[in-house]
Image (spheres, rainbow, N blue to C red):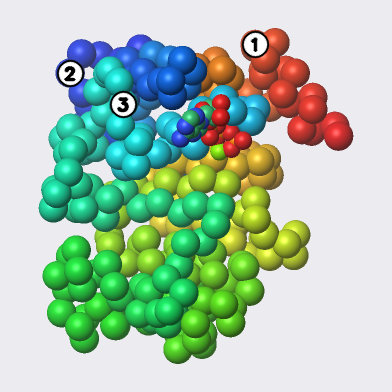
Amino acid sequence: MTEVSVVKDAVPAADDLVVLKSVNKHFGALHVLQDIDLTITRGEVVVVIGPSGSGKSTLCRTINRLESIDSGDIRIDGKPLPAEGKALARLRADVGMVFQSFNLFAHKTVLENVMLGQLKVRKTDKKQAEEKARSLLDRVGVGTQADKYPAQLSGGQQQRVAIARALAMGPKVMLFDEPTSALDPEMINEVLEVMQQLARDGMTMVVVTHEMGFARSAANRVVFMADGRIVEEAVPDQFFSNPRSDRAKDFLSKILHH
Ligand SMILES: Nc1ncnc2c1ncn2[C@@H]1O[C@H](COP(=O)(O)OP(=O)(O)OP(=O)(O)O)[C@@H](O)[C@H]1O
Ligand SMILES: [Mg+2]
């Protein structure tokens, strides 16, 4: 049994953490997400791949409601996504997101960047927030950079700070949208290693990436998207050695043999 079925029982399993059912999203006439059904269980690492414009970023953005959906249902830990207000801020804290561009606050130090959400959203007291921030910065290997400003760090260091900042909120799931695409080659591995460790520690992760080495070694499942649909999903070995759809075969031949 290597394939993961998209058909699930009517009663959600206790360890289903992120559940999308019949999700549709349009941008004007463009149907960017078409009947997406996807269930991610606690502790699972799902790598999403597919051609440019297939809807990978939009999929991630709907999961923490940076984008609304037209129809369907998205639940995190059994609860539907809140539309606005404090509940939405808490949802965003539960669903950590790391983008291609690091999106750190330029006028705050690294330490302040990692403390801010804890203070504002989680209402953690200052001393505790600082302790947690410092320990997370150590964990991602940038503890000595705590008092610098983001611009004084390399891209790889900034991205690791962005990961620490998301982790500081104690998220249930982490979304990564091409976290290494903007990095110089020599900095890619230091970010992937932090993500590998996070996966080993049991974090639930959705990762959009072109790093097939990461997909092979860290993913429990590869989801292949094309034209707004999930065309194929399988464990990495099966997907890479024996893709079933022509779209996936074509995509893999382009990225693996160029
Ligand atoms: N805010 C928007 N308004 C209009 N169209 C959009 C918007 N965001 C994305 N799109 C379109 O929706 C489609 C899916 O975009 P999306 O960014 O999700 O693709 P992707 O798979 O992440 O692509 P890439 O690999 O290039 O990052 C594309 O055709 C894109 O041009
Ligand atoms: Mg994208």
Residue 160 can be seen in this image: yes
Q: Earlier in the sequence, mark 3 or mark 1?
A: 3
Residue 245 lies, with reference to residue 84, above or below; the image says above
Q: Which residue is mark 2?
A: 11
Question: Helix or strand or loop: what does disc 1 sit on?
Answer: loop
Could you tell me the amino acid type at mark 3? Ile
Q: Residue furthest right?
A: 258
Could you tell me the amino acid type at mark 1? Ser
| Residue drawn at the location 68% of the way across and 65% of the way down | 187
Q: Which residue is mark 3?
A: 69
Instruction: Determine crowd level at label 3: few under 14, some 14-19, many 20+ residues with C-alpha closer than 10 A.
Output: some
Q: Earlier in the sequence, mark 2 or mark 1?
A: 2
Q: Nearer the viewer, mark 3 or mark 1?
A: 3
The foreground one among 231 and 238 is 231
The answer to whether 167 appears left or right of 216 in the picture is: left
Question: Helix or strand or loop: what does disc 2 sit on?
Answer: loop
The answer to whether 7 appears left or right of 33 in the picture is: left
x and y, in percent, of residue 65 in the image: 30, 39
